[in-house]
Image: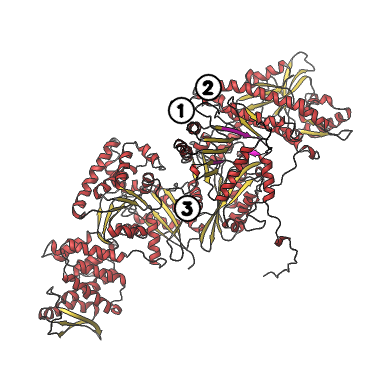
């Protein structure tokens, strides 16, 4: 072994943005998979699209900021911001091309075959349909439109971030020759997809912008419309709040939300057939560079396909909906605290239902013995039952402390609303910490029982969001172990602004302790390997891009530690580098559910340790967020966690393995039993549910008792 | 027994903290929550002698939050103690009043001896403590303003010494002078060595096996030194010193990050670690134990003992007696005479139980006073009582409050001197304590009268109350005419206090018992 290898060599690392694009490609390839039901494939197209939007708004925007700021530092893979932007531009163009060709050439014909039509040109309408559309325009669309012409007295208007607009060139009916530019926003209050009647009973939709385009002359009655094309701009939206200055974080975020609409234009999408003159005008007014213009061969913004996915009927074109199974340890209607006292409980969503977590808070809010409920909330669903339970608990006189992370990207507006609601109910609401995003997922219930205070804790890898819990794979545990309970109390004391505890029993927190802990765990395996022992790490996460961790992994691999990584998204680590990463495998699972859990397994010379938690191996998770990683202590729970890892490592249906060339490829399945980890977990969860026991099945009449 | 919850709030030099405890049947208090809030009261308190309104405001806010938290736990009983930081401030009274008005919490400001005793109680509540003091151990309690060293040998307390050198005091004295860290550290070392020199010369009569360290940062430090340390954090002293030597080579930022401290520039960490080092170097134990709990744990133990929620593991009264004995020996005053007087005075005390109306605690004070009553002669034969008073008042007797020490010292003083009217001593004693002093010194005087010759002539002393007389019947082989003659004279004082006349009766014994 060459001891002089520089594990920091940029050649050994992949740029994180390019790695992310590869992830979006993997999502897109799901849309290209003929084994997947048609509407599911449509859904993946939509996801690719919304992913890309966010990527531009956050990542590309911040790279642009770096270029503007003349920031010269190179990234982990040795690229400057400009170099990255060039590479990203090339890669995204390719991605978008594949996306549209998949949509236009494969999916649209297949949809048509199934009797579903998505018209993206109003010229294709029948006469009947035309009449219907025109009436719809007149009644519903016209009243909400605000057409704006640009001339000497009327400056170019603000084109809002991510909104779809139609640009048109007009000539005055009186004064021939002079062309005027006009733009109108496709109203976001109306559905993008409009169903129109058909004669043969097939399902037919037209896009809203086409309806407007067809009727555009109505908007500019004094002009002749020369041409009209839809376009969309994307603006720099990375929220960097200057927290030192912000006396009131809440207000600051509200201000930023307004400002977000004004950011620099970083992408312009326009129909590929658009008029040159029109495009030139847009380009100058929006101050957008050539390389940031994307000419789109199809409808702009494919996120509307998510709506198509949900159309009624056509169930045969979708996966059968999966119902999350009940957690075997918790019987319905059971007192959840009794269940937890019987032993730690492992939860694996969405295979198992998220209900116990909701129930945990709900029961606590009503339980007379409960003194306090404390919880961190990052992203919650719109009509969250957890929020109403917390409010209820406060009204019932319990001490409720809620840490609301306002900085959760793109969710701020939403978060502010319910944070206010909680405050009104009497909860103690903490609006995040200055300088740190609180990403940890922890809920604590303090209960006064006969033998004293007992603390019940839920720790998880995913947010307290009952909607996403049906789509994201996440793990969690319930426990009332004193060591963890004490730590949980300390976590909330710390989040409330009190000093940190003198020591932690079990939990490991970022930003102060977590990085060291992971490095130590990896180094310990390295030491075991050097001593000639078996050494192994299995880690599952969403993204891996922390230079320090990757370096430690390289060193461990070089020392002979066998490392298997299951990384859904970004992975800056390269495999198969001689002397550096030959012992490392990386696979990514992109399936029907979004892989979201983080599980870390260390062989530790036979005394295995398994951790789970909210943190990825990313600098932002380890250094700039409050994260919690917790050990899985009970043997039976450890087995469950390990089982998840083992099945995912055996997955040969949805897993793609990273090669030394940096490409992700599906495995050769010849001669092997097909394993689809997500499907297997679904089946296992169903089998685990205890058969209905005699008690609940028995039929008895229960005599009512008089109320006291 | 049902669960009993108790909260201890402590206003320290640089933080305010709350601990919530639960007591159940005969078990150690269980800590349910521990909340610390940083508040640098010390800077103003020790710098200006008063605390400004901004800090008082912050203090009240924190205390109000603590009260909310206590309510959340449905805590039944709580106590709020303040350290030296509030003691003797020019606006102490106003601050306490403000706290009460704004939060409803009444704060008790601890005297030094109470403070030390409480933290000592926390340590003494542990099993390993009893084991360590069986050989020899020094309990070192390092505070912001001063430190206290208590030495145990073979299970007995030998001495408690108060040394005016605390972490904050050292920082104020030597820090912030624009010196380099290296120089600062050397200065502290030198200063501390000088401070500890006389202590070592006087009281380090033999090797000490253990140093039991009670201090802030102690736990953080020991955790780094002994990574695999279980609950009981014990380290070899060489290792302890080596680690601090290594720390000393680092910058302040590196030290704080090494120890995982919350602040980048913890002002007291450097004085603390150097102080620890010099202590361990000077006492030279085999091992250092950092029990790792604070004053609140002591408050909880203290509360539990007082309310009979917990049986005392350690006999604190024995500490007092033992400390008094060693003090007495130290001043060459311990003798058979004192042994005899201890028996006599306690016997009289017990006989008078119904008459003096005092309790067990006062009996301990009487015994302590008896042991110490002759120590002044070491300084001055002529002015024995006054010297004894001074000696007692300037010695630490762990387990006695400041007031109790005053009572002991005055009891000794009025053993020979006529009792001053209350007005003259009202600065030192409240009326109840004045009465106690009078009652105890009267008993001591009677006892003394019975052994005027210091030769323990009496045997089989029987004491009984008959009507309005205290009848003391003694058997004596020798001639007791000296005692008889002086008895009347010495007991007038007793008569005036108890309205009861002591009578000495002799049963002459002609055969000396062998």
Residue B264 location in percent, x, y? 39, 39
Q: Are marks 1 and 2 on the same chain?
A: yes
Q: Is residue B284 above or below residue B465?
A: above
Residue B435 location in percent, x, y? 27, 72
Disc 2 on helix, strand or loop? loop
Q: Are marks 1 and 3 on the same chain?
A: no
Q: Which residue is mark 1?
A: A1
- Camera-nearest residue between B306 and A433: B306
Q: Which residue is mark 3?
A: B65
Q: Which residues are magenta?
A: A585-600
Task: Specify whether A587 is left or right of B311.
Answer: right
Magenta stretch contains residue A596: yes
Q: Which residue is mark 2?
A: A80
- Camera-nearest residue between A186 and A599: A599
Q: Is residue B122 above or below residue A511?
A: below
Task: Specify whether A623 is left or right of B213.
Answer: right
Inter-mark Cα distance, 3 to 2: 50 Å
Chain label for disc 1? A
Q: Residue B95: in sight, yes or no?
A: yes
- Quick one: label 1 or label 2, which is nearer the N terminus? 1
Q: Is residue B55 above or below residue B485?
A: above
Tag nearer the camera, 1 or 3: 1
């Amino acid at each position: 072994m060459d001891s002089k290898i520089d594990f920091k060599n940029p050649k050994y690392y992949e740029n994180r943005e390019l790695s992310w694009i590869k992830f979006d490609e993997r999502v897109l390839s799901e849309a290209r998979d003929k084994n997947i039901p048609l509407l599911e494939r449509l859904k993946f197209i939509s996801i690719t699209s919304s992913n890309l939007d966010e990527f531009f708004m956050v990542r590309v925007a911040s790279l642009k900021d770096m270029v503007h700021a003349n920031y010269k530092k190179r990234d982990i893979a040795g690229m400057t911001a400009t170099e990255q932007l060039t590479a990203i531009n090339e890669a995204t163009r390719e991605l978008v091309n594949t996306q549209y060709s998949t949509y236009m050439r494969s999916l649209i014909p297949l949809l048509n075959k199934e009797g579903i039509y998505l018209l993206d040109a109003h010229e294709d309408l029948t006469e009947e349909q035309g009449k219907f559309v025109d009436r719809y325009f007149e009644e519903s669309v016209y009243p909400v439109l605000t057409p704006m012409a640009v001339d000497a007295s009327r400056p170019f208007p603000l084109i809002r971030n991510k909104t779809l607009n139609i640009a048109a060139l007009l000539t005055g009916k009186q004064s021939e020759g002079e062309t005027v530019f006009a733009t109108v926003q496709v109203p976001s209050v109306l559905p993008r997809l409009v169903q129109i009647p058909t004669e043969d009973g097939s399902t037919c939709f037209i896009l809203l912008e086409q309806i407007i385009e067809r009727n555009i002359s109505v908007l500019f009655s004094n002009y002749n419309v020369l041409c009209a094309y839809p376009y969309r701009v994307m603006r720099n939206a990375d929220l960097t709040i200057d927290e030192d200055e912000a006396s009131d974080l809440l207000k600051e975020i509200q201000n930023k939300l307004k400002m977000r609409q004004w950011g620099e234009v970083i992408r312009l999408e326009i129909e590929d057939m658009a008029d040159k003159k029109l495009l030139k005008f847009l380009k100058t007014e929006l101050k957008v560079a050539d390389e940031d213009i994307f000419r789109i061969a199809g409808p702009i913004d494919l996120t509307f396909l998510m709506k198509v996915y949900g159309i009624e009927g056509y169930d045969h074109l979708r996966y059968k909906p999966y119902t999350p199974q009940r957690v075997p340890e918790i019987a319905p209607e059971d007192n959840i605290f009794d269940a937890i006292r019987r032993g730690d409980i492992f939860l694996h969503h969405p295979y198992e239902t998220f209900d116990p977590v909701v129930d945990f808070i709900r029961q606590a809010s009503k339980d007379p013995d409960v003194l306090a409920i404390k919880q961190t909330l990052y992203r919650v669903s719109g009509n969250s039952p957890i929020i109403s339970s917390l409010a209820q608990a406060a009204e019932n006189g319990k001490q409720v402390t809620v840490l609301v992370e306002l900085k959760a990207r793109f969710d701020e507006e939403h978060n502010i609303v319910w944070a206010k609601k909680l405050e009104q109910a009497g909860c103690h609401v903490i609006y995040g910490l200055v300088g740190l995003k609180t990403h940890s997922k922890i809920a604590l219930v303090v209960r006064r029982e006969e033998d004293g205070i007992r603390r019940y804790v839920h720790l998880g890898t995913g947010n307290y969001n009952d909607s996403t819990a049906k789509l994201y794979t996440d793990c969690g545990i319930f426990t009332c172990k004193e060591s963890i309970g004490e730590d949980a109390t300390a976590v909330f004391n710390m989040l409330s602004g009190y000093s940190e505890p003198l020591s932690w029993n079990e939990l490991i927190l970022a930003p102060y302790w977590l990085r060291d802990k992971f490095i130590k765990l990896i180094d310990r395996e390295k030491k075991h390997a050097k001593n000639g022992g078996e050494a192994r790490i299995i880690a599952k996460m969403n993204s891996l891009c922390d230079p320090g961790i990757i370096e430690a992994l390289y060193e461990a691999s070089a020392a002979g530690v066998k490392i298997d990584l299951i990384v859904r998204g970004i992975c800056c680590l390269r495999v198969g580098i001689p002397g550096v990463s030959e012992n490392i495998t990386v696979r990514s699972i992109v399936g029907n559910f979004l892989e979201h859990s983080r599980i870390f397994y260390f062989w530790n010379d036979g005394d295995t340790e398994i951790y789970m938690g909210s943190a990825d191996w990313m600098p932002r998770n380890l250094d700039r967020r409050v994260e919690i990683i917790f050990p899985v202590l009970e043997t039976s729970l450890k087995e469950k966690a390990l089982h998840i890892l083992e099945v995912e490592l055996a997955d040969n249906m949805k897993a793609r393995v990273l090669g030394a060339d940096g490409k992700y490829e599906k495995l050769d399945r010849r001669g092997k039993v097909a394993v689809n980890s997500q499907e297997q977990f679904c089946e296992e969860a169903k089998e685990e549910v205890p058969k209905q026991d005699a008690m609940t099945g028995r039929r008895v009449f229960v005599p009512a008792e008089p109320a006291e | 027994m049902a669960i009993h919850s108790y909260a201890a709030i402590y206003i320290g030099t640089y933080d305010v903290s709350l601990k919530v405890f639960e007591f159940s049947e005969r078990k150690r208090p269980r800590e349910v929550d521990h909340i610390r809030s940083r508040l640098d009261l010390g800077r103003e308190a020790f710098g200006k002698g008063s605390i400004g309104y901004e800090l008082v405001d912050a203090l009240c806010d924190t205390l109000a939050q603590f009260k909310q938290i206590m309510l959340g736990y449905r805590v039944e009983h709580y106590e709020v103690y303040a350290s030296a930081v509030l003691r003797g401030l020019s606006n102490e009274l106003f601050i306490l009043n403000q706290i009460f008005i704004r939060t409803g919490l009444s704060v008790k400001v601890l005297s030094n001896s109470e403070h030390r005793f409480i933290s000592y109680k926390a340590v003494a509540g542990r099993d390993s403590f009893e084991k360590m003091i069986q050989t020899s151990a020094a309990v070192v309690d390092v505070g912001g303003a001063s430190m206290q060293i208590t030495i145990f040998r073979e299970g007995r307390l030998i001495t408690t010494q108060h040394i005016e050198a605390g972490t904050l005091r050292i920082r104020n004295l030597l820090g912030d002078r624009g010196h380099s860290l290296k120089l600062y550290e050397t200065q502290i070392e030198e200063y501390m060595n000088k401070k500890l020199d006389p202590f070592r010369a006087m009281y380090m009569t033999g090797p000490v096996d253990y140093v039991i360290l009670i201090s802030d940062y102690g736990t953080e430090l020991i955790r780094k030194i002994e990574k695999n340390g279980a609950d009981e954090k014990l380290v070899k002293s060489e290792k302890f010193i080596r680690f601090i030597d290594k720390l000393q080579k680092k910058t302040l930022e590196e030290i704080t990050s090494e120890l995982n401290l919350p602040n980048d520039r913890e002002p007291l960490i450097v004085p603390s670690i150097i102080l620890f080092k010099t202590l361990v170097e000077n006492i030279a134990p085999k091992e250092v134990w950092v029990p790792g709990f604070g004053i609140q744990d002591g408050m909880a133990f203290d509360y539990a003992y007082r309310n009979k929620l917990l049986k005392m593991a350690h006999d604190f009264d024995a500490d007092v007696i033992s400390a008094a004995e060693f003090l007495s020996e130290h001043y060459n005053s311990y003798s058979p005479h004192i042994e005899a007087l201890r028996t006599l005075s306690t016997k009289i005390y017990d006989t008078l139980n119904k008459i003096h109306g005092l309790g067990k605690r006062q009996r301990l004070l009487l015994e302590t006073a008896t042991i110490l009553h002759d120590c002044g002669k070491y300084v001055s034969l002529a002015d024995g009582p006054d010297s004894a008073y001074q000696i007692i008042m300037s010695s630490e007797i762990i387990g006695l409050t400041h007031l109790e020490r005053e009572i002991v010292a005055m009891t000794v003083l009025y053993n020979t001197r006529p009792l001053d009217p209350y007005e003259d001593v009202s600065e030192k004693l409240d009326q109840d304590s004045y009465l106690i002093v009078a009652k105890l010194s009267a008993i001591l005087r009677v006892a003394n009268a019975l052994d005027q010759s210091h030769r323990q002539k009496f045997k089989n002393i029987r004491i009984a109350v008959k009507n309005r007389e205290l009848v003391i019947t003694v058997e004596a082989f020798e001639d007791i005419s000296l005692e008889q003659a002086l008895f009347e004279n010495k007991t007038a004082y007793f008569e005036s206090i108890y309205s009861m006349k002591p009578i000495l009766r002799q049963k002459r014994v002609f055969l000396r018992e062998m």
